[in-house]
Image (tube, grey):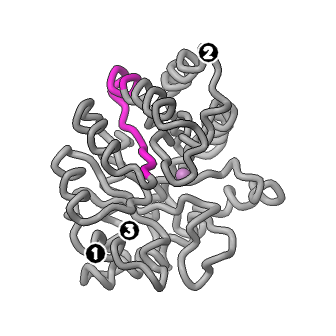
């Protein structure tokens, strides 16, 4: 069995976990999971993530507004986020970012709120967890402007973009998408990313790796993603897990 699985991006608030959340979270360590960053997407889920991190030693919390949840944003919420960030189990501001695929809120609105959250993270010396969907150019411009620490999660850009992100000192998060049959760009990126900048993630309950694609994802399925990364990088899956766990602890300042 593989161990030292550090899932750098999970959404355990999702209703798909409602029927068995406590049992699942209590079982993950026995399945080799050593760390999870539970990402909020608005105030409610951010608070839930902090509360969950206090119940389980191996769970850490990230707090923020996801670009698809901006309609939940109310005046004063940035102050609430700032207070949450002071909690000892909060290791990042996230999940924040830009989503021009669904574009639920206008681009200017998305840009305004993500920029405020990046400034908050910089002020508190916390890394960010960034979601970039079909918004590569604006993402790069923002990251160049503010130079935050952090990770671009579920990375969907080209190798050229990965190079830019790495030049800025940030990490690349890869998940189940690298195992999909039609994965070309993620596999090229998986080959390219230097050892020191690679993180592994689920984005669960979504992005379930093959052969469970379509079913609910959780952190215990990361070995299937590690297997694929190991194949393209010419190392063992356990080496991928050890490397990405070490990187996650460095980025999120754990231990
Ligand atoms: Ni996510």
Which residue does the image show at 20% across and 45% down from the upper left? 169
The one of 108 and 136 positioned closer to us in this rendering? 108
Residue tagged 1: 188
Which residue does the image show at 52% across and 68% down from the upper left? 32
The one of 72 and 36 positioned closer to us in this rendering? 72
Residue tagged 2: 75
The nearer-to-camera label among 3 and 2 is: 2
Vertical placement of residue 109 versus 208, above or below: above
Residue tagged 3: 241
* Magenta-drawn segment: 119-132
Q: Alpha-carbon neighbours of circle 3 within 10 Å: few (<14), some, or many (≥20)?
A: many
Vertical placement of residue 213 versus 143, above or below: below
Residue 22 appears in the rendering? no
Residue most extreme to the right: 19
Q: Quadrant of the C terminus?
A: top left
| Residue 188 in the image, given as x and y percentages of width and height | 28, 75
Q: Secondary structure at mark 1?
A: helix
- Closer to the chain start, of discs 1 and 3, is 1
């Amino acid at each position: 069995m593989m161990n030292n699985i550090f899932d750098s991006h999970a959404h355990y608030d999702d209703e798909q976990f409602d029927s068995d959340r406590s049992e699942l979270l209590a079982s993950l360590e026995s399945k080799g999971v050593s760390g999870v960053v539970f990402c909020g997407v608005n105030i409610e889920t951010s608070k839930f993530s902090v509360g969950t991190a206090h119940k389980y030693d191996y769970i850490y919390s990230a707090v923020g507004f996801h670009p698809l949840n901006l309609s939940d944003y109310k005046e004063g919420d940035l102050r609430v986020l700032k207070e949450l960030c002071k909690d000892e189990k909060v290791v990042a501001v996230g999940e924040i970012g830009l989503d021009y695929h669904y574009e639920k809120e206008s681009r200017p609105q998305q840009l305004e709120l993500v920029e405020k959250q990046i400034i908050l993270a910089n002020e508190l010396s916390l890394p960010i967890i960034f979601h970039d969907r079909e918004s590569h150019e604006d993402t790069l411009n923002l990251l160049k402007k503010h130079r935050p620490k952090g990770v671009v999660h579920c990375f969907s850009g080209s190798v050229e973009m990965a190079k830019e992100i790495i030049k800025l000192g940030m990490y690349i998060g890869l998940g189940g998408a690298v195992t999909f049959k039609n994965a070309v760009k993620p596999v090229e990126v998986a080959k390219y990313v230097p050892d020191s900048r690679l993180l592994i993630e689920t984005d669960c309950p979504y992005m379930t790796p093959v052969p469970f694609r379509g079913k609910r994802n959780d952190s215990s399925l990361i070995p299937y993603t590690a297997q694929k990364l190991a194949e393209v990088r010419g190392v063992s899956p356990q080496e991928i897990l050890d490397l990405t766990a070490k990187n996650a602890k460095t980025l999120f300042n754990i231990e």
